[in-house]
Image: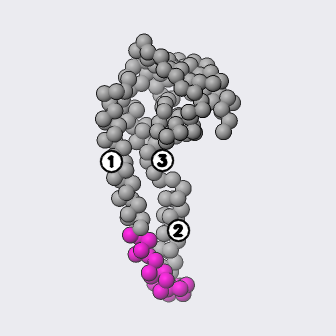
Amino acid sequence: MEITIFQKFKNYKRDCIKYFIYDTFDSFFKAFILIYLIILLIGLLNFIDELNFYPDIINMLIPSLGIGLLGMLIYSTFFLIRAVIKINKERKSLFEGEMHLSFSSEEINFLYDGNTYSFNLNEIKELKVIYGTAFFISIKNDILLRINHKEITNGSFLKLIEFIQAKWKR
């Protein structure tokens, strides 16, 4: 299967920021926020005397979980700022223009600016599709390849996803 994309840096930067936000706010973070909201609701019900559910423990948990949530948000913000700085530094090494991608059962080849590069499907740890962008994540947890459905000039994004799912079942 072959597709052609026209890659632009601004799309690359936007897609990578979407990926880092999606990756940062994982299920643990969402579960922590949900638990904090439940504790807050119980604390509010204790405060208005609708519920008497361990008020001493709940009153102790509200500020401590709030500080933990604030710490997680600050850490995530610094992580995101570091990621944006890293992306901006990569700008000089990224290719902007037309890129031809060829997918086989064993490897992915991409040709741009007269150079051919390839990597095996074994180097890919996972495939994430976030809002119409496919991210091929390497074993080192880096983005190995990014394909935005809006940048495809020749080929189909849905056929690409179906092809990858059929060939690479992990």
Q: Position of residue 105 (x, y in %)?
A: 65, 24
* Residue beneath the point at 50% across and 74% down: 39
Residue 156: tell me if it is visible. Answer: no
At label 1, the amino acid type is Ile
Residue where numbered disc 3 is placed: 22
Q: In the figure, residue 127 lies in which quadrant?
A: top right
Q: Which residue is mark 1?
A: 81
Query: In the structure shown, which secondary structural element does the residue marked by tag 2 occupy?
Result: helix
Q: Which residues are magenta?
A: 47-67
Residue 47 rendering spot, x and y as whole percentages:
46, 84
114 is higher (above) or lower (below) than 126: above
Q: Residue at x 53, y 62 (%)?
A: 31
Q: Residue at x 40, y 32 (%)?
A: 12
Is any atom of residue 1 visible in this view?
yes
Residue 35: mark: 2
Figure check: 151 above or below 49: above
Q: Is residue 41 above or below residue 12?
A: below
Magenta-colored stretch includes residue 112: no
